[in-house]
Amino acid sequence: MKVIKPGSTIGILGGGQLGRMISIAGRNMGYRFITLDPTPDSPCGQAADRQIIASFSELNAAKELANSSDVITYEFENVDSDVASILETTSFVPQGSELLKITQNRIREKSTLQSNDVPVAPFMVIQSEKDIHRAVDRFGFPCVMKTATGGYDGKGQWVIREKDQIPIAVEALKHSGVEMIMEQFISFSKELSVIVARNLAGQAKTFPVAENIHINNILHQSIVPARITEEQRKQAEIVALKVAESLKAVGLIAIEMFLTNDGAILVNELAPRPHNSGHYSMDACVTSQFEQHIRAICGLPLGDTTLLSPIIMVNILGQHLGKVLDKLDRLPTTAKLHLYGKKESKENRKMGHINFLGSSFEQVFQQIEELKIWD
Ligand code: ATP
Ligand code: MG
């Protein structure tokens, strides 16, 4: 297995908060960083040694990143396939571009999972108005239509709750002109996620199962350890490892799942990178997801992922930032604040998160409530 030793330079495609936190973890280990992002002084650019300011589709900029780096990683999925292949031919890209291609498209992602016997929410490919009617007939109400590519934080999704809402979906399909999928709406008891790290030698390790609460389709809290049975926890880990193995993932892969009301686990979505629901690991695990990602792509042994304390991670969106800054003196001394250095604060934009450590969830929930930041 190729080993990229500390002192080497890691190139990160994308300058957002995930790249920033990879850089901060890697700097502690002695790595150097260079990032490529169109926005000057990006969250990652602030923490890296250097930022190339260019659009992600600029091939010369991608070449420059590759030539300046000993290993390349990416912090978002929508990497242009031409860029990915340039990077692969001129630099070491242990994650490869295959998994990226799969996870860029919900149809490919779900079909690949299905062909590997991983349970997913029932879905149909939508290319025409007729397909919408067929899917509604099959799944009933509610069902949810999603764009095959480019969605995040619930963007590009239409929930159809009744007959009257079908024309909205038809209009959305016509207007966007892109392929969609329709999914059965899953009545879940919990949303869970498991992050798996896997290296080039095939060694794999899971992080503790997180229980995720979404508000308006945006992650609000991750509660760890998830409040599920031992059997459900094992099942979630088995499914996650199966996904990582069957897709031959290298680096991190986050697996979002539904725990259905009947106790079954269905995979919702994959992300071949560090994930928001793994930010708790920065303060609560022996090894954080960011350090683990570096270990995995650099060929170092994977670190221990033992959970050291119960923890609740709460996201800080644009609308919460002002209150957080006003209440810094009221944060519990066991709360760890992480801000991403974004210049512009916007409604629903992820600006940071707080990791609340504590001895019991009751205590931590009470602390969060008393702050009155998120209500
Ligand atoms: P992310 O920010 O995680 O990338 P996304 O926009 O790509 O989100 P999903 O993860 O597919 O989209 O959906 C966002 C949320 O919407 C889910 O976490 C879940 O709460 C809800 N949701 C999505 N699909 C379904 C479904 N089939 N049944 C029930 N709820 C769903
Ligand atoms: Mg999701």
Image: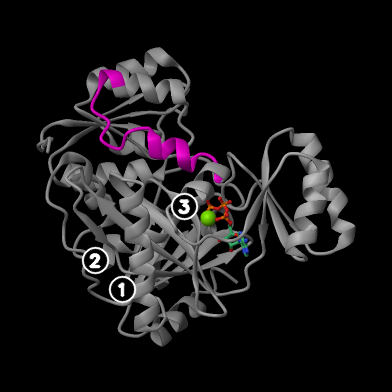
x, y percentage for residue 242? 34, 58
Give the residue type at disc 1: Thr
Q: Residue at x 49, y 62 (%)?
A: 119
x, y percentage for residue 271? 43, 49
Q: Is residue 15 visible?
A: no
Mark 1 is surrounded, within 10 Å at the Cα level, by few (under 14), some (14 to 19) or many (20 or more) other residues, namely few
Mark 3 is surrounded, within 10 Å at the Cα level, by few (under 14), some (14 to 19) or many (20 or more) other residues, namely many
Label 1 or label 2, whichever comes before in sequence order: 2
x, y percentage for residue 101? 45, 35
Residue 8 quadrant:
top left
Instruction: Find numbered disc 3 in the image and state the secondary structure of the residue it sits on.
Output: helix
**What segment carries the magenta color?**
89-106
| Vertical placement of residue 240 versus 247, above or below | below
Q: How far is mark 1 from mark 3, CA to CA? A: 43 Å
Residue 223 quadrant:
bottom left
| Vertical placement of residue 32 versus 206, above or below | above
Asked if residue 104 lies in the magenta stretch, the reply is yes
Check disc 3 and report the residue beneath it: 113
Give the residue type at disc 3: Leu
Asked if residue 159 lies in the magenta stretch, the reply is no
Mark 2 is surrounded, within 10 Å at the Cα level, by few (under 14), some (14 to 19) or many (20 or more) other residues, namely many
Instruction: Find numbered disc 1 in the image and state the secondary structure of the residue it sits on.
Output: loop
Q: Is residue 157 left or right of residue 20?
A: right
Q: How far is mark 2 from mark 3, CA to CA? A: 29 Å
Q: Which mark is residue 333?
A: 1
Label 1 or label 3, whichever comes before in sequence order: 3
Q: How far is mark 1 from mark 2, CA to CA? A: 18 Å
Q: Which image quadrant: the C terminus?
A: bottom right
Check disc 2 and report the residue beneath it: 285
